[in-house]
Image (cartoon, rainbow, N blue to C red):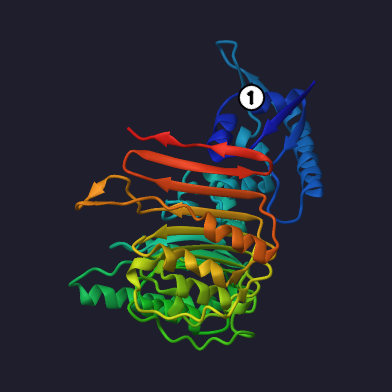
Amino acid sequence: MTRTIIVYTLPTAYDMLDSELLPKLIKGHDIKLEMPIMREEATDLWIVNIQSRLSFRRRTNANSQKVVIPDQLQTDLGPSPIQLLPLELLSYIFLLSVEPSLFPNTVASALTLSRVCSVWRATVATDPRLWSSTSIHIVPNQKWRDLLILLSTRSGDRPLSLELIWHPTRGDKEYNISISNTLYRQLPLLSPRWHRLQLFVPLDIVALILDYAPLPNLEFLSLGSECEEPPVLNWTQLDHAPNLRTLSFAALRSRPIWWDMPWSQLTELNSKSLLSGPQAVFLLSRCPNLERCQLRVESARFEHEEEDEDVLVVVPKLKSLSLVLGGFDDIWRLFGLFRRLVFPSLDRLEFRDAVQNDSVVGGLYKKHYWVGEFLVPLLDRSECSLEAFRVVLVGGSSHIELGFEGGTLVDRSRTRE
């Protein structure tokens, strides 16, 4: 009979390893491994290799010695269940629990896992993949410094993914200078290896990381810094970050329109920063290769901007567009931006209303607006065909979510208690 071990998450692995199931499987049954689809190469050959090593471990364990103790119970002197798993499988369990694209909340995930047992400590110490992605939250202790050093020394030459969070302590100038000096010493050395960066740090540290040296491996960049004026970066479109494809502005006042970035090579752009309609159009005009985009548009904040309504902006590769809407004081200025846009490849469109309220506030009754009179001409002009469309409107007592996906109508509207 063939048993199946399915490893998806770390807690599942713990349940399996701490029970008597694994020794029984290895001694008496074949093992078939079913893994989630790996992010990179190595699937079939990788699994065959793991199965081969498990088979060897099973044969070794079958020959382990037994001793009889006075109460007639038998104790197995063979290796512990966790030692029966090869390093590749332990590493993969770890990688599943520390998904680099999500960045866990824990500050030192690799160090946390190394405390489980000696086998995990050996795994953590010897596999550079486990150190190539981490999240560092700078707080008043020394642990984050150790983690930063280990990120550099234990990751080998692998590309690095880092989420760095630091909000300087007000009134403690000496402490802040000490942290800055540490970052200035450590971060520039890693410039050639950055693959993904999420930065929630002061602007001088942002400039240090992004502008010190070329970033040949950087593909994903998220900026969470509030700024009145972004730093001047000496980037050129072709040689400083040639592989940058995804750019995200994660702060409400990160002001993407002021940043000097290699816009034309981006395939994905996300911004939580407030933009007027003309500003959103301007950003789209700078990104001709964009495929996915999410912007927050709030026209009420910008009342005196001019736009050239006769110039069309064509984004030929854009497939997915999501707009978070607000500031409906001038509905024509907000949705009028569609009159200038052409999206020949658009197949997914979403409108999200983050600030609307269907109750009386300050004597005014705010209404929800339908965008059909602007949307239909956009689709006709672009000659595109939507496969998915969604409108999400959140009011004081209701949540309206309507749309379609493929040929199916979707209505997830509900009344909020």
Give whichever of 378, 255 is nearer the camera. 378
Residue at figure coordinates x 68%, y 67% from the top left: 317
Q: Quarter of the image for the N terminus: give it.
A: top right
Instruction: Assign a secondary structure to mark 1.
Output: helix
Identify the residue under disc 1. 21
Work out whether residue 88 or residue 283 is closer to the camera in this orientation and state it: 283
Q: Position of residue 364 (x, y in %)?
A: 24, 53
Describe residue 394's horizontal placement relative to residue 175 as left or right. Answer: right
| Residue 123: percent from left, percent from top | 59, 50
For badge 1, the amino acid type reads Leu
Percent x, y of residue 175: 25, 73
| x and y percentages locating residue 116 in the rendered image | 49, 42
248, 275: nearer the viewer: 275
Left or right, 55 with reference to 287: right
Residue 149 lies, with reference to residue 123, above or below; the image says: below
Q: Residues within 10 Å of mark 1 (few under 14, many from 20)?
A: few
The C terminus: image quadrant: top left
